[in-house]
């Protein structure tokens, strides 16, 4: 089924299936015909090995992006939470034999098992138009689960894209900036206006790509490492001394000793710390216990 970005086609399709948009699920379908081909190109072309390409798509909606991925990749597994969309996808993508639709919540799905069962011998990438409300949980699950995937190409709220792709040491950097850079190199690919969607959200979006790599630093305890990052940014207007003292429930003299041992200025703000700094602080915290 073609012309899935045509508003009239979408309305007729959804009406025929008795579908109404769910605000709770953050459903906004793309109507800008230029966006999905660019996303699909970026996702599939990120694979340089020459191996067959498998794609995990999260939230296919009515299948606009899915169609583009199916035309470029060897196999696509689309994970859709809303079971009301399953018959819609049967109609819009029924011609493709390299598609599997899984009705599930991606945050609860065993993605290691899915990859093992569905993508044998393939290089796997993730591509998705993510609902704003689950952007951070989904991205962190994909990274923290240490999946055998190469890249993550996703559309997110513009503000989130700026945070995720911020350079360390800048005002836009945050706890998730540091966490993401631990696992991958992020790049903002292009912006997408709110008018590209139906219904139109109140904010613009952007497409980013995360290229996974081995961590550049190796803290002794990842749990402590991420707790330190989260704690340092918890009160970002305060010094790292004050913020960590409060968030880790440690007295200031103890934190001062930790920061001194790690070679970190106690008066610095969290956004000024590098991954190496956070790793050193994390190791020093563990040594104090």
Image: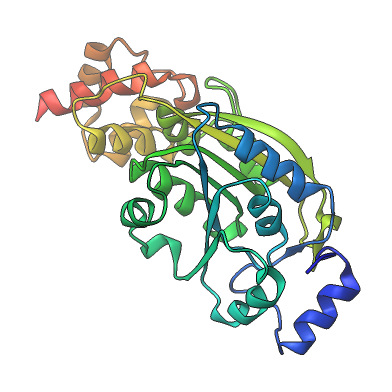
Residue drawn 48% across the image and 47% down it: 139
In the rendered image, residue 75, in percent from the top left (x then y), is placed at: 53, 53
* Horizontal arrangement in the rendering, residue 49 relative to residue 59 (left or right): left
Depth check: 247 or 262 in front?
262
Q: Is residue 123 above or below residue 262?
A: below
Observer able to see residue 22? no
In the rendered image, residue 229, in percent from the top left (x then y), is placed at: 37, 33
Q: Within the image, what quadrant is residue 32 found in?
A: bottom right
Q: How many marks?
A: 0
Residue drawn 76% across the image and 53% down it: 203
Q: Is residue 240 above or below residue 77?
A: above
- Identity of the residue furthest to the left in this view: 289
In the rendered image, residue 153, in percent from the top left (x then y), is placed at: 59, 42
Q: Is residue 97 above or below residue 154?
A: below
Residue drawn 53% across the image and 29% down it: 50
Depth check: 80 or 182 in front?
80
């Amino acid at each position: 089924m073609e012309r899935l970005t045509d508003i009239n086609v979408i309305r007729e399709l959804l009406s025929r299936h008795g579908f109404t948009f769910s605000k709770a699920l953050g459903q906004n379908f793309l109507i800008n015909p230029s966006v999905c081909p660019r996303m699909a190109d970026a996702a599939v072309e990120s694979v340089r090995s020459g191996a067959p390409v498998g794609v995990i798509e999260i939230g296919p909606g009515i299948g606009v992006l899915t169609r583009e991925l199916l035309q470029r990749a060897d196999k696509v597994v689309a994970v859709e939470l809303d079971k009301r969309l399953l018959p819609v996808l049967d109609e819009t993508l029924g011609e493709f034999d390299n598609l599997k639709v899984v009705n599930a919540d991606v945050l609860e799905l065993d993605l290691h098992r899915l990859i093992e069962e569905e993508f044998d011998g393939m290089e796997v990438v993730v591509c998705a138009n993510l609902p704003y409300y689950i952007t951070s949980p989904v991205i962190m699950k994909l990274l923290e689960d240490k999946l055998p995937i190469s890249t993550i190409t996703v559309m997110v709220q513009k503000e989130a894209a700026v945070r995720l792709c911020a350079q360390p040491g800048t005002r836009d950097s945050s706890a998730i900036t540091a966490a993401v850079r631990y696992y991958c190199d992020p790049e903002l690919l292009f912006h997408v206006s709110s008018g590209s969607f139906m219904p139109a959200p109140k904010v613009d979006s952007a497409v980013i790509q995360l290229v996974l790599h081995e961590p550049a630093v190796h803290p002794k305890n990842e749990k402590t490492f991420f707790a330190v990052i989260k704690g340092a940014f918890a009160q970002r207007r305060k010094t790292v001394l004050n913020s960590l003292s409060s968030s880790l429930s440690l007295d200031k003299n103890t934190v001062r000793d930790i920061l001194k041992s790690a070679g970190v200025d106690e008066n610095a703000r969290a956004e000024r710390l590098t991954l190496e700094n956070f790793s050193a602080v994390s190791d020093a915290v563990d040594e104090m216990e």
